[in-house]
Image (cartoon, rainbow, N blue to C red):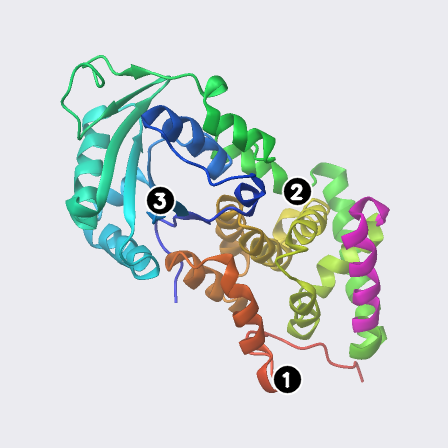
Amino acid sequence: MKPDKHPQDSISNNPDLELMDSPLRLRGGQDVASLIPYLLGFHPHDSIVALVCIDGRLLMTARMPIGMADHPLELDDQIRRISNRAQGADWILVGYGNDRPRVNDALHLTRDLVGSDNVIDVLYVSGDRYWSLTCTNPSCCPPEGVRFDAAYSPAALRAVVAGLQVVDNRECLKERIRPPRGWTARGARFRLDDAHDLIRRLGPDAAGQRLEELLATGLDDPADLKLEDLAMLSALSYYGDMRDISYRQLTRANADRHVQLWQAVVRATARDDQGCALALLALACWVSGDGAMQVVCMERASKLVPDLGLLHILHDLNRSAAPPTLWDDLVADMFRGDHEQVSDCELMVEE
């Protein structure tokens, strides 16, 4: 199975929104345009963003690159997968990009595929203005667009209070997994080689015990781990039976701490060696509700370890817009009968 040519960023009911003291109500285009960057974690460009709601409650946010509209069958497949997860949902479609005619065409195509009866509104956003493609009343939707100020939007302000943050663009998310460079990268490779040597000498039981110790320390505070400890975690992530231990400890309640830990591991690992740790970080991002960062990690990991079983599962989850609430059932299935289903290699005792 190959990764999607145009992966989507899916954020299913971001947990931080649940920290708000009352349901979030979007009052119009200004709230929609102001809130989307907080839902995604970055300001979208050349994108179609779908807000999918059921009974007035935001179920998920999905970002699809504008180029997907050039492949209608692929776009239709993505929409069908989302629709299967959210039957009877109402959609708000928002387009971003400097080429307005192209964005509008993509929005019209997406609306047709979703079904116009299921679409509440369709907006085009450029800079600090938005245009509704469904409203022709010049008193509320003038030809020059409607100016909005996200800094004063009640929806955006509540998102800030809830802890949601925004970076300038999707590329900025890659800074969170920036590998060491130069002599620092060379030192990281030496530490990783030493860690692999030690793991082979330890054997499965002792290596598993060491992993549990490092996870306990790192989940409490990654800053307490030395560079050698981070290298050991990176090396242990190569082995399926070691990843099992990490899976078992990942819950929706502690997913944010797993994100912080594996992000520290990835940043301490040379680029060509990041693959398995990136996959674990992507998994933690999905469980925590950070779909955009999940996809960023998956994209890089797919170039490094394309045959990793965990990545195949993550791609399936992303394509189907699976919500993080499925993690409990998924991990139970993975270990039913104490048999791990996604391991790629196991740590064997060296003769």
Quadrant in the picture for the N terminus: bottom left
Magenta span: 208-226
Establish if 251 lies above or below 218.
below
The residue closer to the viewer here, 164 or 338, is 164
* Kind of residue indicated by mark 2: Pro
Decide if residue 137 is on the left or right side of residue 198: left
- Nearest to the eye among marks 2 and 1: give it: 1
- Graded by Cα atoms within 10 Å as few (under 14), some (14 to 19) or many (20 or more), the crowding at tag 3 reads few
Establish if 273 lies above or below 57.
below
Q: Main secondary structure of the magenta part?
A: helix
How far across and how far down the image is residue 109, in percent? Answer: 17, 42
- Nearest to the eye among marks 1 and 3: give it: 3
- Nearest to the eye among marks 2 and 3: give it: 3
Quadrant in the picture for the C terminus: bottom right
- Graded by Cα atoms within 10 Å as few (under 14), some (14 to 19) or many (20 or more), the crowding at tag 2 reads many
* Residue marked by disc 2: 179
Mark found first going from the N terminus, 2 or 3 = 3
Mark found first going from the N terminus, 1 or 3 = 3
Say which mark, if any, is on residue 338.
1
* Residue marked by disc 3: 56
Mark found first going from the N terminus, 2 or 1 = 2
Circles 1 and 3: CB atoms closer than 8 Å = no
Residue 166 in sight from this viewpoint? no
Residue 244 in sight from this viewpoint? yes
Decide if residue 241 is on the left or right side of residue 122: right
Instruction: Give the mark count.
Output: 3
Decide if residue 179 is on the left or right side of residue 342: right
Establish if 298 lies above or below 308.
above
